[in-house]
Amino acid sequence: CNMSSVISVIRKNKVYDVGEIIGGYDTPSMIDSIKSRYEDCQINVYPDASGKNRNAQSASESSLQLLQAARFNVFAPSKNPFVKDRVIAMNQSFNNGTHFVNVKLCTTHSANLEQQTYNKAGEPDKTAGNDHTNDANGYLISYKFPVVKPSVKRTRLIA
C-alpha cells in the first residue's frame, strides 16, 4: 500500500504544508509515524471518508476508529467530495493565495503537485503515482475550504 499524509499548519485561514509522510503500509503504521514525529502536538486528521469502512487491516475496526483511538481529532465528512470538486478546491486554494507548500520539507508532495496529469474524464490520473499526497492534502482543503456551488432560484413569471 502507499498511504500518504501531508502535514499542514493552518494560521489565519491560510494553509502551510510543512511535512509529508509517504509510503505508509496501513493505518496503524501511519498512526505510529505521525505520533513519533508529532508526539507533543494536537493532531487533526482529515482522512478519506471511505476510511470508515472495515478493511483487511483489521476485521473489527475501521481506519477512522483507529485514528480516534489514537486520540487524533478526526474530521471526516459522511462521504467524500466529488473528485473534481476536490481538485477545484485545491486549485482555488493556490490561486487565491491561501495555500502554500514548503518545497524543502515536502519534496514528494511539491513534485506530485507539479507532475499530476489528468485522464480523459478530467480526473487525476492514478497510473503515474503522483496522486497520493495530492489526494491526502485535498481532503483537508476540501473539508476546510469546500467548493461553494452557486444556487439557482427559479421564479415563474406571470404574463
Image (cartoon, helix red, strand yellow):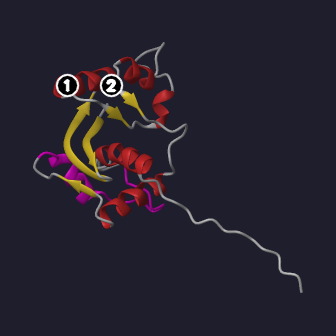
Residue 56 position, x and y percent, is 43, 20
Work out which residue is located at the far bottom of the displayed protein and give it.
Answer: 159
Q: Going from the N terminus, do you reach mark 2 or mark 1 first? A: 2
Q: Where does the magenta region start and end? A: 105-126
Between label 2 and label 1, give the one nearer the viewer: 1
Judge by depth and name the residue closer to the eye, 149 or 1: 149
In the rendered view, tell whether residue 157 sits above or below residue 118: below
Q: In which quarter of the image is the N terminus?
A: top left
Q: Residues within 10 Å of mark 1 (few under 14, many from 20)?
A: few
Q: In which quarter of the image is the C terminus?
A: bottom right
Residue 140 position, x and y percent, is 37, 45
Q: How far apart are marks 2 and 1 (CA)?
A: 23 Å
* Secondary element type, mark 1: loop
What is the quadrant of residue 117 in the picture? Answer: bottom left
Label 2, on which residue? 26
What is the quadrant of residue 65 in the picture? Answer: top left
Residue 109 position, x and y percent, is 22, 48
Amino acid at circle 2: Asp
Label 1, on which residue? 40
Judge by depth and name the residue closer to the eye, 121 or 59: 59
- Kindly identify the residue that appears in the image at 23 percent across and 28 percent down: 34
In the image, taking residue 101 as reference, residue 78 lies left or right, namely right
Work out which residue is located at the far front of the displayed protein and give it.
Answer: 12
Work out which residue is located at the far right of the displayed protein and give it.
Answer: 159
- Kindly identify the residue that appears in the image at 10 percent across and 49 percent down: 104
In the image, taking residue 42 as reference, residue 60 lies left or right, namely right
Residue 28 position, x and y percent, is 31, 20
- Kindly identify the residue that appears in the image at 46 percent across and 16 percent down: 61
